[in-house]
Image (cartoon, helix red, strand yellow):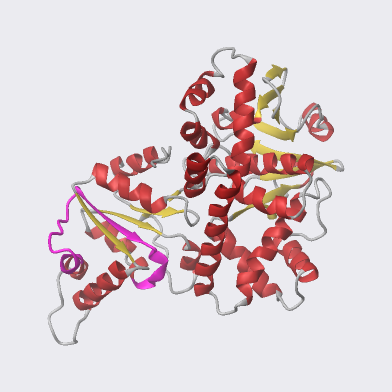
Amino acid sequence: MYLKRFVYDRLLDWKNEGGHSTLEVGGARQVGKTYLIQKFADENYKHKIYINLFELSGKQFMECYKQATDWTPGTKRREHPLHDAFQLYEPDFIDSEDTVIIIDEIQESSEIYNRIREFTRHFKAHFIITGSYLGRIYDPEFRYSSGDVTKLTIYTLSFEEFLMAYDQNLYGDYKKISLVSSEAEVYNRLKETYELYCQIGGYPKVVENYLENRNIVKAQGELVKIIDTFTNESIRYFTDILYTKVFTHIFFSICRILNREKKGFSEDSISEELQKLVTKDYSSNISKATCNRAISWLYFSGIIGFCAKITEMDILDFKSASRCYFMDMGLANYYLTRTGTDSRVLAGTLNENYVYINLKKRQDFPPEISFETPAFATYRGGEIDFLAQSLSSSTRYLIEVKAGKGTASTAQKALAQGKADKLLYLKGATKGGIDGKTETLPIYLLEQYKFN
């Protein structure tokens, strides 16, 4: 089953740009990176070479690479050893603009990763490198080629992508809903589909499973397989067996922090708070270093994302990693449910997690909003769910994720005192509307909203 991905257009933009950079595609395990890149290559190039450094093709290429780059002092050096390596691997190799070379699981070889600058500057062919565990490239033996790489992150399916696969007719109504007045039935159906998406999430295999079986439990079984695969593969990059268990402990601890709602936490960073919780609730044998390395691994593997804190609405008082969220709604729902979260709190936390993911995507290149990461804010003893600022106009938005008729007194106070330009309410049961500087929007329409 092919699930349409909007990121395909970004791949086309990269191919057509004049800079001829190497494309580095990141994203969590099982988000569809390899499938999408292979499809893109097949449809847009005459020649394709695919090498997976984690599989046999990688072993074979490394043998070709070693033979092409070996040199005995005093003998004549090869003029183009890298070209020769690809010629040995693929005798029909043509170095042309119509050739793309895909190197998957690039984190398996610092030797090949460190050649990126030469790929970019010495070949006519286009290069795409990718991997599910790119956190490894921050180890000392990997050298980052600044200026020679274009980064692209592939996330799990957005709500729009899920909706397109789930119901084409409803997707058509969704695209028109902001242009014409729609029937209440359309809003209700979109709300129900969004709530389903919050349970299923966006991992392509999980979505495909649900579309084939229409069974949430079976779909979650597919998600559990993805979690197990991630855990089992990750342990290859660690020396301590404790890491396999600490990942799960961290997931549960994230849920408990998110469910505290407005109470905040005592430590200055999410890493400190998680380490304290993991040690207290699970095992005092887990060291601070072990916990912090596991948290960093989850972040660089695209499993969790960090959220900043802006104290007293002062953007100069910016703490970059003060909270964290899951990078997939199904993953968030799975662990929040397992912690025993009641239905009201669950819905609110999932909605907040959804908004976080959306804001995070808007900070990728080309960015739409400011700050290094999404951010929440405090103001005069209260908290505001998120603070966003448009890059095009510097308009500052207070974002409140609300259920029912809840009001956001802290955000209203900050707006009234000129700390922001607009207040955006995101709710499930609403048709939306505008009242002065306050705008209300159905949460499932957030992906269409522009921070102008």
> Who is closer to the viewer here, 250 or 420?
250
Give how far across and how far down residue 150 sits, in percent: 39, 51
Q: Residue furthest right?
A: 381
Up the image or down, 367 lies above or below 436; here it is: below
Q: Is residue 232 magenta?
A: no
Residue 389 visible (yes or no): no
Up the image or down, 25 lies above or below 160; here it is: below
Give how far across and how far down residue 3 sits, in percent: 42, 40
> Who is closer to the viewer here, 390 or 168?
168
Magenta extent: 86-111
Look at the image and tell me in which quarter the N terminus lies. Answer: top left
Q: Residue shown at 19%/87% (left/top)? A: 73
Figure quadrant of residue 80: bottom left
Give how far across and how far down residue 103 sits, in percent: 32, 61
* In the displayed structure image, the side of residue 199 where residue 176 appears, left or right: left
Q: Residue shown at 54%/39% (left/top)? A: 214
Give how far across and how far down residue 176 sits, in percent: 51, 18
Up the image or down, 443 lies above or below 288; here it is: above
Q: Is residue 92 magenta?
A: yes
Q: Residue shown at 66%/48% (left/top)? A: 333
Q: Residue furthest top?
A: 181
Q: Residue shown at 57%/54% (left/top)? A: 221
Look at the image and tell me in which quarter the C terminus lies. Answer: top right
